[in-house]
Amino acid sequence: MPGGGCRTADWSLALPSTGGLRLSAAGDSRLGGSPLPSQHHRHTLPTAEPLDLFAAEPLAGVGPVAVRKSRQDWIDAGMALLRAEGQQALTIERLLSELGVTKGSFYHHFGGLANYRQALLQWWEEDFTHRPIQEAWKESKPALRAQRLNKVIRQLDYPLDIAIRAWGLRHPEVAQTVASVDRQRIDCLIELHRDQGHRQPEILAYLEYTAFIGGQQIQPAPEGAERALHQALELWRNYDP
């Protein structure tokens, strides 16, 4: 659908900010009328044997914990540690110290490190990719979808996005989830460009998304950087090879 020169909002032009960590759940989304991957279609990590650090069984004879913590409490604590200190901080000792509970609570919710890692990654995929797309597709017109997507993306916690990507450099399972998220985001941008009648939507989507990933690494963003990106992408949209 022709966009009448409207700009496409996406995961590149919303330059990173240092907003606080948001911890909330999100449902499934739809992309251009087609369902996003459902829970059983999305990539899930194999249930590998836990690392030695998490291999110990809950202590025998330990009664109910004094302070009950939910599954989401554990995810929130892990994301906060990951954001602040990186994946090396995700140890059972640090998590227990942060939450003030015993190992029994951890094993009750997750059973081991592999399941906990999967829960962290699923939360990140839902809240940082599916939820923004879901919000954007509440709009019926492509140009309005683009604007709404841009607004939602500006609220994301970019340092956490960076921490997940860095984690993926050291863990193949995490890298698979990062690759899946990248593909979903790029596909969303391609559809937005195509629906607005932009030429070469695939190239535009890749340019915008790679600009977003690169922009995450520059904090704070140089003055005028966002305007320069808009102008560069506008030139490309008008280019007809």
Image (spheres, rainbow, N blue to C red):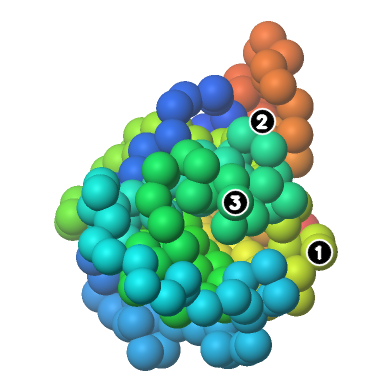
Rendered residue at 36%/72% (across/down): 61
Quadrant position of the N terminus in the picture:
bottom left
Rendered residue at 40%/43% (across/down): 100
Helix, strand or loop status at disc 3: helix
The amino acid marked with disc number 1 is: Arg
The amino acid marked with disc number 2 is: Leu
Q: N-terminal of the two: label 3 or label 1? A: 3
Q: Which residue is mark 2?
A: 229
> What is the distance, in whole Å, between disc 3 and disc 2 at their CAs?
44 Å
Rendered residue at 31%/61% (across/down): 71
Helix, strand or loop status at disc 1: loop
> What is the distance, in whole Å, between disc 1 and disc 2 at their CAs?
31 Å
Residue 228 is drawn in which quadrant? Answer: top right
- Res. 93 mark: 3
Rendered residue at 41%/89% (across/down): 41
The amino acid marked with disc number 3 is: Glu
Q: Which residue is mark 1?
A: 170
Quadrant position of the C terminus in the picture:
bottom right
Mark 2 is surrounded, within 10 Å at the Cα level, by few (under 14), some (14 to 19) or many (20 or more) other residues, namely some
